Image (cartoon, helix red, strand yellow):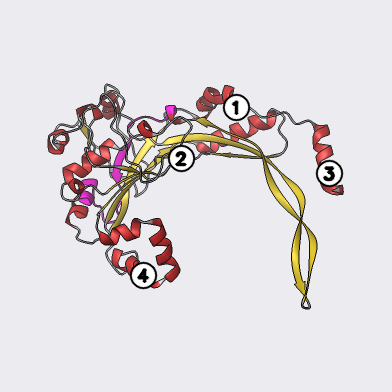
């Protein structure tokens, strides 16, 4: 179907009704990210992602990409994981997402697009509720005055956490993200992949950021108000942390090994000059071509109203009771302590 002019750069876009109808007939994409995350644990940066049981690995990226479920108006083919996952070596980047420096991704646009499809799994989204309060405390501090040393007692305010928990919102996220480009020059995702393949810079990289289109402000107001209605009167913070929101490919060589190493990067920043030279070489300043490409986006969507999501998670929301008498006692404690 014909479409109007492209939306402004950075505006969340999504599949058409016809494309959604086709995707709804497909099985859920294999969740390659959480396959290696143990229950209650955290992904370790640098740890390789395991193979997903029961899902084949593609023998030919070109064969998989040439037979997509559909090709979006942004020029990106959408393939399902049942057709074959990318065989590229991939590592966890902590809760941020995944990274890869596999050689097959360095010289093949098809391999790159299959890799982006494989790891275009929906981000993990949670509703985090934290209750807290401030306490006035004292501590001893050594002071040197007029050449003499003595100890003084000082008071300070410390934030104390009372409770914190998360409610998983990931099941509400539609499993297929819309991959597109927000490049100011108008380059499409296949064009950016080709640019990465042609680039000879040792610090080149290509990153895809995942975003979730939803009325989080509306849900925040509902959750906040509900927790207050339960009787909680102390400090309250409601946030929506996100994980598995980045997919990055870079070139493996001696220079990138230094830059990707956390200790070496800290040392470079402390000594300034190596950091400055490497950033200039990578094109971080506006006067040089940028070799760290970050203009690929994957837009996900929660196809529910905020009130619907709230009703779906309300039974999981809680807070310890806090009476008016307890509040008065706490105020008096802060005054006379």
Q: Earlier in the sequence, mark 2 or mark 4?
A: 2
Query: Is the Cβ of the residue at disc 3 closer than 8 Å to that at disc 4?
Result: no
Q: Which residue is mark 1?
A: 317
* Badge count: 4
Q: Which residues are magenta?
A: 171-193
Q: Which mark is residue 242?
A: 2
Extreme-bottom residue of the structure: 146
Q: Earlier in the sequence, mark 3 or mark 1?
A: 1
Q: Residue at x 25, y 52 (%)?
A: 186
Q: Earlier in the sequence, mark 3 or mark 2?
A: 2
- Is residue 18 found inside the magenta-colored segment of the image? no
Vertical arrangement, residue 21 with respect to residue 120, above or below: above
How far apart are labels 3 and 1 at the CA level? 29 Å
How far apart are labels 2 and 1 at the CA level? 19 Å
Residue 18 horizontal/vertical position (percent): 26, 27
> Which element carries disc 2, helix, strand or loop?
strand
Residue 78 horizontal/vertical position (percent): 23, 34
Q: Earlier in the sequence, mark 4 or mark 1?
A: 4
Q: Earlier in the sequence, mark 2 or mark 1?
A: 2
How far apart are labels 3 and 2 at the CA level? 38 Å
Q: Earlier in the sequence, mark 3 or mark 4?
A: 4
Q: Which residue is mark 4?
A: 274
How far apart are labels 4 and 1 at the CA level? 50 Å
Query: How busy is the neighbourhood of tag 2: few (under 14 within 10 Å), some, or many (20 plus)?
Result: some
């Amino acid at each position: 179907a014909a479409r109007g002019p492209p939306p402004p750069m950075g505006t969340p876009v999504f599949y058409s009704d016809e494309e959604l109808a086709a995707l709804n007939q497909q099985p859920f994409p294999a969740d390659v990210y959480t396959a290696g995350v143990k229950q209650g644990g955290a992904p370790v940066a640098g740890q390789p992602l395991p193979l997903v049981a029961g899902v084949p690995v593609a023998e030919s990226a070109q064969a998989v990409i040439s037979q997509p479920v559909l090709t979006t108006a942004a020029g990106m083919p959408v393939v399902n994981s049942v057709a074959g996952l990318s065989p590229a070596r991939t590592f966890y980047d902590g809760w941020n997402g995944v990274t890869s420096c596999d050689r097959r991704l360095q010289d093949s646009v098809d391999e790159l697009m299959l890799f982006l499809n494989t790891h275009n799994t929906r981000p993990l989204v949670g509703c985090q509720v934290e209750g807290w309060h401030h306490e006035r405390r004292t501590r001893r501090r050594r002071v040197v005055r007029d050449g003499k040393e003595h100890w003084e007692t000082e008071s300070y305010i410390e934030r104390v956490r009372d409770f914190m928990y998360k409610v998983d919102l990931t099941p509400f996220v539609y499993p297929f993200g819309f991959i597109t480009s927000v490049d100011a020059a108008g380059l499409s995702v296949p064009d950016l992949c080709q640019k990465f393949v042609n680039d000879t810079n040792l610090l080149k990289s290509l990153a895809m950021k995942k975003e979730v289109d939803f009325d989080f402000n509306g849900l925040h107001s509902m959750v906040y108000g509900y927790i207050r209605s339960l009787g909680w009167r102390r400090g309250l913070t409601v946030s929506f942390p996100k994980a598995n929101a980045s997919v990055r490919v870079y070139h493996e060589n001696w220079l990138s090994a230094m830059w990707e190493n956390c200790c070496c990067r800290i040392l470079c920043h402390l000594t300034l000059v190596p950091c400055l030279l490497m950033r200039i070489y990578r094109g971080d300043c506006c006067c040089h071509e940028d070799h760290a490409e970050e203009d690929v986006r994957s837009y996900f969507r929660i196809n529910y109203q905020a009130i619907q999501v709230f009703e779906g998670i309300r039974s999981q929301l809680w807070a310890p009771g806090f009476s008016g008498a307890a509040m008065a006692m706490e105020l008096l404690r802060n005054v006379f302590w």
